[in-house]
Image: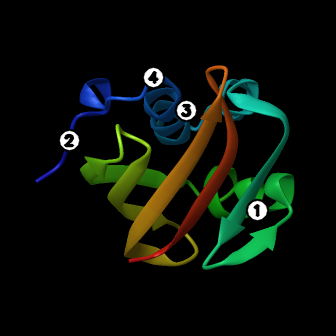
Amino acid sequence: MTIQTARLSDPAVRAFVDAVNAHDRARFMDLLAPGATMSDDGTDRDLTEWIDREIFFSNGHLKVERESNNGRDLLAGYRNDTYGEMRTRWHFEVEDGKIARFETGQA
């Protein structure tokens, strides 16, 4: 079962998923706090390089299956043109309405 993006609890996370699925890099970047960081499968990555490769240059798309932690933790199907579809987990740290850090990896 998929949760509609509009029904996600946390406004910053909801906007993140919406920007990813709309392939709107400019809007995505506006959601990030200055100095935002991220990790993939437990390893910190260069955020700009990672989002371009994993999301925006490879048609990334999120289908949220479940949320917890007041909407800051997601279980989602993630698909892109490079790796196909996989089940992923996402954790978000939000400060002043902006995403300060996100962590993702296979679930």
What is the CA distance from the residue labelled 3 to the residue labelled 2?
Answer: 16 Å
* Residue located at (46% from left, 31% from top): 18
Identify the image quadrant of residue 70.
Answer: top left
- Work out whether 17 lies above or below 31: below
What is the CA distance from the residue labelled 2 to the residue labelled 1?
Answer: 25 Å
**Label whose residue precedes the other's in the sequence (4 or 2):** 2
Q: Position of 1 compared to 77: left or right?
A: left
Q: Position of 56 compared to 52: left or right?
A: left
Mark 2: few/some/many CA within 10 Å (<14, 14-19, 20+): few
Residue 94 lies, in percent from the top left, at 61, 35
1 and 3 marks in contact (CB < 8 Å): no
**Label whose residue precedes the other's in the sequence (3 or 4):** 4
- Work out whether 30 lies above or below 70: above
Label 1 belongs to which residue? 50
Q: Nearer the viewer, residue 105 or 94?
A: 94
Residue type at mark 2: give it: Ile
Closest to the camera, between mark 4 and mark 1, is 4
What is the CA distance from the residue labelled 3 to the residue labelled 4?
Answer: 12 Å
Label 4 belongs to which residue? 11
Instruction: Report the quarter where the C terminus lies.
Output: bottom left
Label 2 belongs to which residue? 3
